[in-house]
Image (cartoon, rainbow, N blue to C red):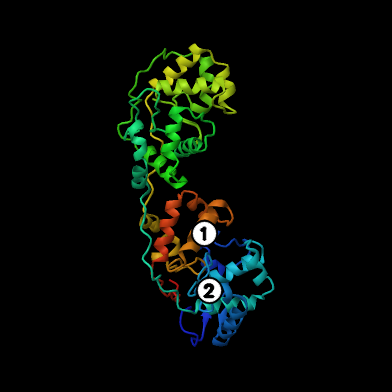
Amino acid sequence: MAIVSKAAHSRAIFILGFLGVVLAPHAVSGQTTRQSSDELRPLYAMGIDIAEGKQLATAVCAKCHGLDGVSKTKEVPNLAGQRPSYLYLELKAYQLGRRTNADMIEKVEFLSDDAIVKVAAYYSSLDSATLPDTPAPPFVDAVSAGKAAAEPCVKCHEESGISKTPGVPNLVGLNPKYLVETMKAYQGGEDRKLDAKNEKMKTALDGLSEKDLGRIALYYALKSENLTRAQTENVGNTTVSKESLSRCVKCHGEDGVGTSPATPSLSGQDNAYMLKALQSYKDGSRDDDVMSPRAKKLEDEDMANLVAYYSSLTPKPTGIVKPMAPDEWADKCDRCHGAGGNSTRPNVPALASQRLDYLAKVLHDYQSGKRQSREMSAMSALLTDDDVSGIASYYAYQKAKSVVYVTVPSK
């Protein structure tokens, strides 16, 4: 196998890929989708090829990516010092319709393989972008931020999230998705009749952004220490008929744990709060396509017994995991992208010194399905907005390093 090095334009030889059989055990599939029959093979770019690549880049790429490969355009990536095989594969992906950016497709659709090789060789030969001049954005710990944002909630719901006031719900044991949607409903006045109590809720929440709501919900979801039912009186008969319970278990379970993120857990919830909610669904002051028709079929005694049954149960942890810090996420990302985002794999992109806004955009694109990769989609699906911001910032402020691929003698 020959040598690939990152050097000045005068360097004689650049190799853009290796034999597919050599890459296969190490490649990250899905960074650029390839057919199983495709393979990477050595493509040698001499000094004259790099010079021609520069001419092509001037005409086709420089307006967005810069002739020096350092982008000054929001959400447009730096190309300088990027791994040549990766650049080649990404440009081919646009030609083949595997990437869908219309502007990029228009730019590259008529380029020959030879032209793509030369452009990739040119940009890979350049010095990578230097670190940003401005300080890195501070990392926001979502749980600490959630605790701070939850200050207005503590007066009624307690710092523990376990209610001591009849008619006030527990906030522990609830999936963050449900709690966020509930808080947004108060903000918008949807599904929540704005009586005096709900007006207080709306006032307390109106100044909070959706990100604030998410952090509050996460803070309470993670409060699994000393979980207990609401510290309020539980009125009613906890023995409930199977017929009555059957109306609830599909969504709320016999153990009172919601069967989906959007469904509230009822175990240990305040008795008076749940009873008022059922009565509101029955009389129409709250409206829900699922709850309203079921509540209308319940007699007052059934309601009281169901509420007493669920209120008597001990709440359970949500199973939500505390978010990792950016350096903890980087330990996982570095396994493919190299230490500090300096990839040593020819067809896996380097992340170090990449534009922060571009890195954040790419992660969101994998989350939404706009970009496709089995591995990256699975990884990014776990990320919150705070995680995305933290990871993007971490790699944008990592120093880019050159990489040399060398011959390894066979054993």
Residue drawn 50% across the image and 85% down it = 9
Q: Which amino acid does the dot numbered 2 rest on? A: Pro
Residue 137 position (above or below residue 288): below
Identify the mark at residue 84; answer none if there is no mark.
2
Q: Quadrant of residue 273?
A: top left
Determine whether the residue tagged by mark 2 lies in a helix, strand or loop.
helix
Provide residue 197's location: percent of width, then percent of height.
43, 28
Relative vertical location of residue 246 with respect to residue 117 in this rendering, above or below = above
Q: Residues within 10 Å of mark 1 (few under 14, many from 20)?
A: some
Question: Residue at left 65%, top 67%?
Answer: 105
Q: Foreground residue, 198 or 324?
A: 198
Residue drawn at x 58%, y 27% is 290
- Which of the two discs, 2 and 1, labels the residue nearer the N terminus? 2
Image side of residue 213 versus residue 54, left or right: left
- Image coordinates for residue 165, horizontal then vertical, percent: 35, 25
Which residue is identified by label 1?
361
227 shown above or below 17: above
Q: Is residue 238 among what the camera can see? A: yes
Under mark 1, the amino acid is: Lys
Nearest the viewer among 406 and 217 is: 217
Dot 2, crowdedness within 10 Å: few (<14), some or many (≥20)? Answer: many
- Real-space Cα distance between discs 2 and 1? 22 Å
Percent position (x, y) of residue 318? Answer: 41, 36
Residue 222 visible? The answer is no
User: Which sits in the foreground, 186 or 117?
Assistant: 186
Q: Which mark is residue 224?
A: none
Residue drawn at 48 percent across, 11 percent down: 301
- Quadrant including the C terminus: bottom left
In the rendered picture of this protein, how many numbered marks are placed on residues?
A: 2
Position in image of residue 190 (x %, y %): 54, 34
Secondary structure found at label 1:
helix
- Choose mark 2 or mark 1, whichever is in front: 1
